[in-house]
Image (tube, rainbow, N blue to C red):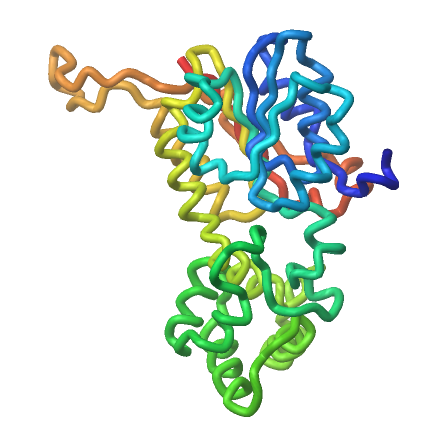
Amino acid sequence: MASAYPHQPVLVQEAIRFLVTMENGVYVDGTAGSGGHSEAILSRMGERGRLICLDRDPEAIEVTRERLAPYGKNVTLVKGNFADLDKIFRDLGLEKGHGILLDLGMSTAQLDHSGRGFSFSRDEPLDMRMDKEGDVTARDLVNALSREELEHILRTCGEEKRAKGIAKTIERERSKKPIESTLQLANLIQSVIPQPHHLRGKHPATRTFQALRITVNKELEHLGAFLEKAPELIFKGGRLVVLSYHSLEDRMVKRAMAEWERGCRCPADLPVCGCGKTPLFRRLQKKGVKPDPEEVRGNPRARSAVLRAAGRV
């Protein structure tokens, strides 16, 4: 199994413990990847349980289809975006789910074997599309956006402090020849950031690649759209579990869950509630859950993961 599916899902036991409360419920793995979390969910489900597996990446859907074939009718696979889960439920004749899991990280297959330029550890075309049907590639952004637009993306989607210098260097270099590959871009960024300022344990291009990938795939927009709909997608008593890998996504999830937990918004001195608002979710743990040192040693890519979970009330 390990050789066929090299991706190691993160915080599996913790995610499933929070997520699965009804063995015959309807569950959604909104980011199926290579099916690791999906398989763990199915192992906790009964004969009448149903799992909906979504992914934007058609290659991920095929890998998951093969992996979960033994579970037969318990599994429905859909090439789709979790931001469209309300429409997907309607298409499947479902009202809501009893639990939704989102793992917002990249799979090992996408990073190491997709050939789409998600990683700077090998020389690949600057693509970064999770769904190859998408219109915009990272190459398009790097070569066509203005210096100011590039700087904005790097600063807001990558939290890159040296965004101005990197954008300026990209603008200068692309005037000589197009920036086509991952190593070409990574080496360019490395030339901008002096060695003493490199992030500990991280390549200096990490934040730039993150920013480009997020922008190409509209990741923050899709997460925001999902969070807007989430309370209407889960039955009372159901659960939402989200794994994030950088602060931008984690802040969005944390704020949404804290807002859902609030009830009445009326002024404290108002004797009777006039707004009628009640809590939508209860956070199952106020602080995010992080992998323990043993898991990080076995899977270094887990080191930045944060799990947040909430129950629908």
Position of residue 297 relative to residue 214, above or below, is above
Please name the residue shown 51% across and 47% down the image: 247
Q: Is residue 113 left or right of residue 56?
A: right
Q: Is residue 192 left or right of residue 92?
A: right
Position of residue 59 relative to residue 169, above or below, is above
Please name the residue shown 65% across and 61% down the image: 116
Q: Nearer the viewer, residue 161 or 94?
A: 94
Please name the residue shown 47% across and 58% down the image: 215
- Quadrant including the C terminus: top left
Residue 46 showing in the rendered view: yes
Q: Nearer the viewer, residue 5 or 167?
A: 5
**Residue 299 appears at what percent x and percent y?**
77, 43
Position of residue 216 relative to residue 236, above or below, is below
Q: How many marks?
A: 0
**Residue 125 appears at what percent x and percent y?**
65, 69
Q: Nearer the viewer, residue 156 or 54?
A: 54
- Quadrant including the N terminus: top right
Please name the residue shown 67% across and 27% down the image: 38
Q: Is residue 233 left or right of residue 115?
A: left
Q: Nearer the viewer, residue 199 or 190?
A: 190
Residue 257 showing in the rendered view: no
Which of the 4 quarters of the picture holds residue 123? bottom right
Q: Outermost residue toward the bottom?
A: 176
**Residue 66 appears at what percent x and percent y?**
76, 33
**Residue 197 appears at what percent x and percent y?**
62, 71
